[in-house]
Amino acid sequence: MTIAHEKLPGLDRERVVAAVEPILAAHRVDAVELVFKTDRSGWVLELTLEKSGERMPGAGITLELCSDISREVSAALDVADCIPHRYRLEVGSPGVERALYNLSDYERFSGQPAKLKLKQPRNSEYTIIGTLQGVSPEKRVTIQTERGELVELSLEEIDNGHLVFDWKTSGPRSGGAKGKSRPHRQERSARRR
């Protein structure tokens, strides 16, 4: 079980992860994102899931699976009593335009279209759109641009990246899941001390 990206400001990371990890392992899923943030309705803990090693974003992540994991994670977090605020728990898939966080993501989704935003411009452009070609032996992300240029970048050069879904044809340009599961939402209140 892995967590590709986490952002848990103001929370005890070890206690939150210790509550979540065993449940994800039992269901044989990885967390793409575990993020605690605020929105218009208050605090929300977002947990996005995927099947380990799956090349199609969201494949195998069903509403039933999200509901089961949501119930179990919610109960585990209540027992751990590690979130001091009233919050909502949202569990879902990363969607067809899944974010890319680490070298293993870029390797696994090789052959799929992606959009990379750079920290510094390359040839006066901050954005590269093309087809992922995996990771070079030097541990650099390789992408073939729409113009046919092969570009290698270190992870440090990439501000953010995500897969690209062709919304005009309602399908991926070169593979991927169709549609996006809706997150299962559950509201929990922190126990009063």
Image (spheres, rainbow, N blue to C red):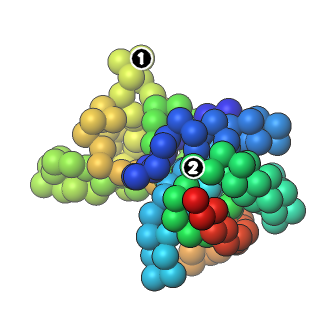
Up the image or down, 5 lies above or below 95; here it is above
- Residue 99 at what x, y percent from top left? 49, 53
Q: Does label 2 or label 1 sit earlier along the sequence? A: 2
Up the image or down, 129 lies above or below 4; here it is below
Residue positioned 52% across, 65% down in the render: 85
- The quarter holding residue 129 reads bottom left
Instruction: Confirm whether residue 104 shows in the render.
Output: yes
Q: Amino acid at mark 2?
A: Cys
- Residue 43 at what x, y percent from top left? 50, 69
- The quarter holding residue 91 reads bottom right
Residue positioned 86% across, 62% down in the render: 64
Local crowd at mark 1 within 10 Å, few (<14), some, or many (≥20)? few
Q: Residue furthest bottom?
A: 40
- Residue that label 2 marks: 82
Q: Amino acid at mark 1?
A: Pro
- Residue 34 at what x, y percent from top left? 55, 51
Badge 1 element = loop
- Residue that label 1 marks: 137
Residue positioned 19% across, 56% down in the render: 125
